[in-house]
Image (cartoon, rainbow, N blue to C red):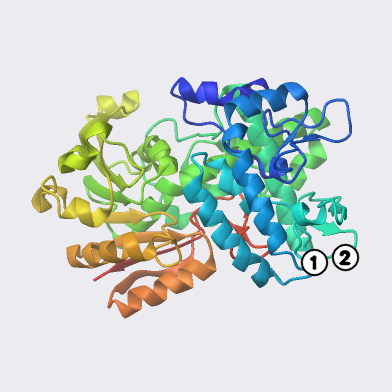
C-alpha cells in the first residue's frame, strides 16, 4: 500500500507542496482514492454509497479519506448525480455531453473548497459511444455495465454499445497510465511528485538549443550533462533504444526504462526555462548579461518551477543575473492578511540561491511576486517602469482567449502588454488554442516575432483532454509564439 500517498495531506502540511493529485486511474475506478493503490484482497474496489464515485481498496482507506477530504465532497457530488439523471438521454453526441459537462464543472469549481472535486466529475468514466456516464448507467433503474478497454483501461464502452476508439488515442492513454503509475511510485520513493533534474555545473562553452536536431534527446545527451542516455533511450523518447534492448539483460532494461520515465517527467518542468531560452535565442536576447522577465498567470506549478530557471544561466555562460517577477492571482504575497491594502499584494525582490560555481562567479538570481493581475501590477505604485520594464513577458498555457478569465482578467492585461511594447512569449496546450490566440493578436495589431508553431521544447508527458475535444491529448506548452506591438 502506498503509505506516502495515503498521508499526502500531512506531508503537504509540513511545507512540501509537491504532492500528487488524484489520479485519473482512480477517478475511472481502478485505484483507491486515498492511497492510490489497486484492490487488496477482493477483485473490486469498495465504492462510496453516497456519491457512487469515490472508490477504495479498504475500509481503512475509506474512513481516512472521509475524515480527510471526502466528507467535504460527497454531498456536492451526490447533487451532481441528481442533475445527471435529469439530463439523461439514451444516446447523445460528444458535443451534447460536453454542453452539460462544462457548466457542471464550473459550478463545482465555484462551490467546492477542495481542488479535486471538480476533476472527479470532469474526468468521470462514460461510454465512448453513447456518452452516458457511469452514474447514469449504474442507476438502479438501468444497471447497465460499463467496461474499460483491456489495453488503456481509461476508455469505456457500455454493454449496449460496440467498442471503438482510435489506436492512436489508446496508445497515448496507455503511455499516460504508465506516467501516472511512475509518478505514484516516485512519490513513495522520494516524497516528491515532480521529478527534476538540471545541468549540474554551468557550461563553459555555449551550445544553442536551436542546434538540437533531436530536441530533448540532444538536450540531455549533448547540451546538458546526461550522457548516459546515448544509445540507451530512443531519440524520440518513446522507449529505450533498439540497441539497448538487444544487448542489455532484462534487469538492466528495467533500470533504463525507469531512467527514461524519470527524464520524460522532468521535461514537464524543464519545458519552462528551455522555452524561455529558445525565445531568447530567436530574439537575440541571449547575449544580454542581465535579464528581467515578467512571468504572467503564475500558479503553483510555475512558482514551484522557479528554481529550474537557473538552467538558463547554466546553459548561457555570459548571463550574469536573472530577475523574475511572478504575477498572478495565485502568486505569493508578503502579507496575505492585508491583501485589501494595495501594496500588500507585492512581495519585494528576494535573492534565490545559486549553485556553488555560479555563486563563486558572482552570478545572481532574484524573484519578486505580485498577487493579482498584470494590469493592476503595472498601474500600481510599486511598478517603476525604468527599473521594472521587462526584457521579456512570458505566459505559459495562459488561455488568454479560451480560458474562463479571458474577458475579466486577460482582456485589460493584453492592452497593457501592447502598451509596454516588449516581446511577449505565450504558449498553449494545443493547436486549437494557438489558432484562436493568433487571430486575437492580429486583430489587436500585434506583429509576430516568432510565428505560432508547435513548440520543440514542449513537455513530453501526454495528458488526456476531458473538456474540449474527445480523445485529444495535450502537452505542457505544446505551441508557442512571440508577439510585440
In front of the other: 464 or 373: 373
Q: In which quarter of the image is residue 360?
A: top left
Q: Helix or strand or loop: what does disc 1 sit on?
A: loop
Q: In which quarter of the image is residue 443?
A: bottom left
Q: In which quarter of the image is residue 72?
A: top right
In front of the other: 405 or 464: 405
Crowdedness near tag 2: few (<14), some (14–19) or many (≥20) residues, C-alpha within 10 Å: few
Identify the residue under disc 1: 129
Identify the residue under disc 2: 161
Counting from the top left corner in percent of width and height, residue 246 is at 81, 41
Residue appearing at x 19%, y 37% in the figure: 344
Q: Helix or strand or loop: what does disc 2 sit on?
A: loop
Residue appearing at x 50%, y 36% in the figure: 225
Q: Can residue 215 be seen in the rendering of this structure? A: no
Counting from the top left corner in percent of width and height, residue 272 is at 43, 48
Counting from the top left corner in percent of width and height, residue 236 is at 64, 53
Where does the N terminus fall, quadrant-wise?
top right
Query: Cβ–Cβ below 8 Å for labels 1 and 2?
Result: yes
Amino acid at each position: 500500500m502506498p503509505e506516502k500517498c495515503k498521508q499526502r495531506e500531512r506531508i503537504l502540511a509540513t511545507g512540501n507542496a509537491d504532492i500528487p493529485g488524484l489520479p485519473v486511474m482512480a477517478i475511472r475506478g481502478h485505484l483507491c482514492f486515498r492511497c492510490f493503490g489497486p484492490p487488496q484482497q477482493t477483485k473490486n474496489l469498495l465504492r462510496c454509497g453516497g456519491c457512487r464515485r469515490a472508490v477504495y481498496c479498504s475500509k481503512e482507506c475509506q474512513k481516512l479519506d472521509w475524515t480527510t477530504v471526502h466528507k467535504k465532497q460527497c454531498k456536492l457530488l451526490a447533487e451532481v448525480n441528481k442533475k445527471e439523471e435529469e439530463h439523461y438521454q439514451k444516446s447523445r453526441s460528444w458535443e451534447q455531453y460536453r454542453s452539460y459537462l462544462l457548466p457542471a464543472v464550473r459550478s463545482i469549481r465555484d462551490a467546492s473548497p477542495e481542488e479535486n472535486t471538480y476533476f472527479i466529475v470532469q474526468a468521470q468514466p462514460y461510454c465512448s459511444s453513447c456518452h452516458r456516464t457511469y452514474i447514469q448507467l449504474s442507476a438502479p433503474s438501468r444497471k447497465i455495465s460499463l467496461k474499460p478497454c483491456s489495453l488503456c483501461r481509461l476508455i469505456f464502452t457500455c454493454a449496449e454499445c460496440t467498442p471503438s476508439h482510435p489506436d492512436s488515442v489508446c496508445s497515448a492513454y496507455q503511455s499516460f497510465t504508465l506516467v501516472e503509475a511512475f509518478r505514484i511510485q516516485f512519490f513513495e520513493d522520494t516524497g516528491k511528485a515532480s521529478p527534476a533534474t538540471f545541468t549540474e555545473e554551468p557550461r563553459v562553452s555555449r551550445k544553442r538549443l536551436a542546434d538540437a536536431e533531436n530536441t530533448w534527446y540532444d538536450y540531455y545527451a549533448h547540451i546538458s550533462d546526461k550522457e548516459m542516455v546515448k544509445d540507451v533511450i530512443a531519440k524520440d523518447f518513446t522507449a529505450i533504444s533498439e540497441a539497448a534492448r538487444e544487448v542489455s539483460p532484462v534487469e538492466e532494461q528495467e533500470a533504463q526504462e525507469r531512467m527514461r520515465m524519470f527524464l520524460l517527467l522532468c521535461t514537464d518542468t524543464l519545458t519552462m526555462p528551455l522555452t524561455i531560452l529558445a525565445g531568447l535565442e530567436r530574439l537575440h536576447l541571449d547575449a544580454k548579461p542581465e535579464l528581467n522577465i515578467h512571468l504572467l498567470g503564475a500558479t503553483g506549478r510555475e512558482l514551484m518551477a522557479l528554481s529550474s530557471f537557473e538552467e538558463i544561466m547554466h546553459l548561457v555562460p555570459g548571463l550574469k543575473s536573472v530577475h523574475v517577477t511572478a504575477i498572478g492571482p495565485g502568486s505569493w504575497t508578503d502579507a496575505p492578511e492585508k491583501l485589501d491594502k494595495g501594496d500588500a499584494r507585492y512581495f519585494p525582490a528576494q535573492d534565490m540561491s545559486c549553485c556553488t560555481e555560479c555563486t563563486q562567479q558572482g552570478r545572481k538570481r532574484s524573484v519578486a511576486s505580485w498577487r493579482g493581475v498584470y494590469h493592476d501590477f503595472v498601474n500600481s505604485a510599486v511598478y517603476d517602469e525604468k527599473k521594472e520594464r521587462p526584457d521579456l513577458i512570458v505566459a505559459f498555457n495562459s488561455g488568454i482567449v479560451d480560458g474562463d478569465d479571458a474577458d475579466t482578467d486577460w482582456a485589460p492585461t493584453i492592452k497593457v502588454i501592447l502598451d509596454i511594447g516588449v516581446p511577449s512569449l505565450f504558449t498553449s496546450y494545443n493547436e486549437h488554442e494557438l489558432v484562436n490566440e493568433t487571430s486575437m493578436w492580429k486583430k489587436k495589431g500585434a506583429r509576430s516575432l516568432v510565428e505560432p508553431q508547435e513548440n520543440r521544447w514542449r513537455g513530453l508527458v501526454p495528458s488526456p483532454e476531458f473538456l474540449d475535444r474527445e480523445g485529444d491529448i495535450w502537452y505542457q506548452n505544446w505551441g508557442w509564439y512571440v508577439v510585440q506591438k
